[in-house]
Image (cartoon, grey):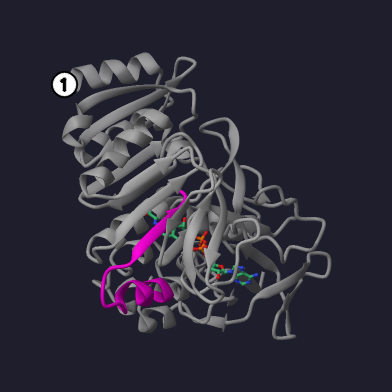
Amino acid sequence: MEHVVVVGSSLAGLRACETLRTEGFTGTITMVGSEPHLPYDRPPLSKKYLSGEWNTEQIALRRPESLGELSLTLKLGAAAVALDTTAQRLQLADGTSLGYDGLVIATGANCRKLPGQPNLSGIHELRTLGDADALRADLSNRTSPARVVVIGAGFIGLEVAATAREPYGCEVTVLEGLPAPLVRGLGAEMGNAVALVHSDHGVTIRCGVQVSAIEGDGSRVTGVRLGSGEVVPADIVVVGIGVVPATEWLTDGRIEVRDGVVCDATLRTAVPGVYAAGDIARWYNGLYGEEMRVEHWTTAADQGAAAASNLLAVSRGEEPKAFEAVPFFWSDQFEARVQYLGRAAGDDEVRVVHGSVDDRKFVALYGSKGRFRGALGVTLPKKLMPYRKLLQERASWDDALAFAAEKGN
Ligand SMILES: Cc1cc2nc3c(=O)[nH]c(=O)nc-3n(C[C@H](O)[C@H](O)[C@H](O)COP(=O)(O)OP(=O)(O)OC[C@H]3O[C@@H](n4cnc5c(N)ncnc54)[C@H](O)[C@@H]3O)c2cc1C
């Protein structure tokens, strides 16, 4: 293997390049990315970067000089538009093409849009540095705080709501079609519990409301019309209704695409020598005995490394390793640090085992069919983290509850 192409110049892609080098690959590595920037970190885009506290240097994933140590050929601002896995050739938007011996797909995801979403100034989404710059400028360049409507009470929507409120002092309303905030990730009971911090800080969250249209005066947004006919006035609207895996360039029928790129337990796609990692990868997680796609920072970083390691191992005639992981994510909203380990389903049993929801500091456990499935911590990191080991060991629900009882409140 002489030439590895990594498509996607963000977290998973960068970790893949780093691992190829640390594991001794001396051939050419080309990193292709549609954005013009060197790899940067996304979590601050809704937090300290959006608030203006951090600048672009502080969100770099690697400083330019240390990126140089990896000896990468960078093709930035050049989106991949087509892939031919038979000819082992990647087509780029600038008209050039690249041959490869090994390929890592790490193109992440793009924001989902509302049906019929109009093109008005003041409507924002948040995935890229460019998106964050546009939203930050809109929040800051004002004589009085804006009325902000966030559509979607998922993690990113709620983080934007918190930042728009503090430090920008905006009047913030979050609109959610489901009966509770964060319901997909945490279930209704814990979604409501986590969102209490928003009502404490004066953010209005309205659940069970349908958005029928975003309204404007022809050039700028003026409000959001609900299914009931009511219009919620807005100077800024942020559409935070989730993401769609960036698979549009995977035109080769040999790579299976099904809400992401389908991979085996080792992150290999249906085509030998082609691996996927990060938000785009749908892989078989043996720890849970199911296929999953995870949109969390830690998984993207670990999968980037694992995909590169397996690509290299197989090229050397060695055995690849299954990627088995307890999903983990965090979210910062006002003073609350939300952390989640594992995988929850809507009908899981939930028990608060440490702290209390009233104090806005607690740990809750999730269990289903006798199995311990996940643990949520709000601003109690030391109490939460020991549960990772139990999840890795596939502990039973009873064992997890006994462990919690032993630790005490
Ligand atoms: C605002 C925000 C806040 C977040 N906060 C948290 C958090 O607090 N905690 C947490 O766990 N996770 C958080 N996440 C999620 C985390 O950032 C992602 O899981 C992680 O960035 C995924 O990395 P990735 O490399 O798989 O994909 P991405 O980061 O999406 O990178 C994919 C890259 O591929 C490029 N690309 C796309 N299509 C093409 C193409 N055709 N050709 C070439 N390049 C292409 C994209 O431009 C992008 O640069 C947050 C995400 C966002 C957007």
In x, y percent, where is residue 243? Answer: 56, 55
Query: Viewer-proximal residue, 158 or 93?
Result: 158
Is residue 134 placed above or below 169 in the rendered structure? below
Look at mark 1 in the image and give the residue it sits on.
408
Q: Quadrant of residue 349?
A: top left
Mark 1 lies on a secondary structure that is: loop
- Quadrant housing the N terminus: bottom right
Residue type, label 1: Gly
Q: Quadrant of residue 66?
A: bottom left
In x, y percent, where is residue 199? Answer: 26, 44
Q: Is residue 151 magenta?
A: yes
In x, y percent, where is residue 339? Answer: 32, 43
The answer to whether one can see residue 266 in this image is: no
Query: Viewer-proximal residue, 76 or 151?
Result: 151
Mark 1 beta carbon near ligand 1 (under 8 Å)? no
Residues shaded magenta: 133-152
Query: Viewer-proximal residue, 320 or 307?
Result: 307
In x, y percent, where is residue 368? Answer: 47, 20
Query: Viewer-proximal residue, 242 or 202?
Result: 202
Q: Quadrant of residue 247?
A: bottom right
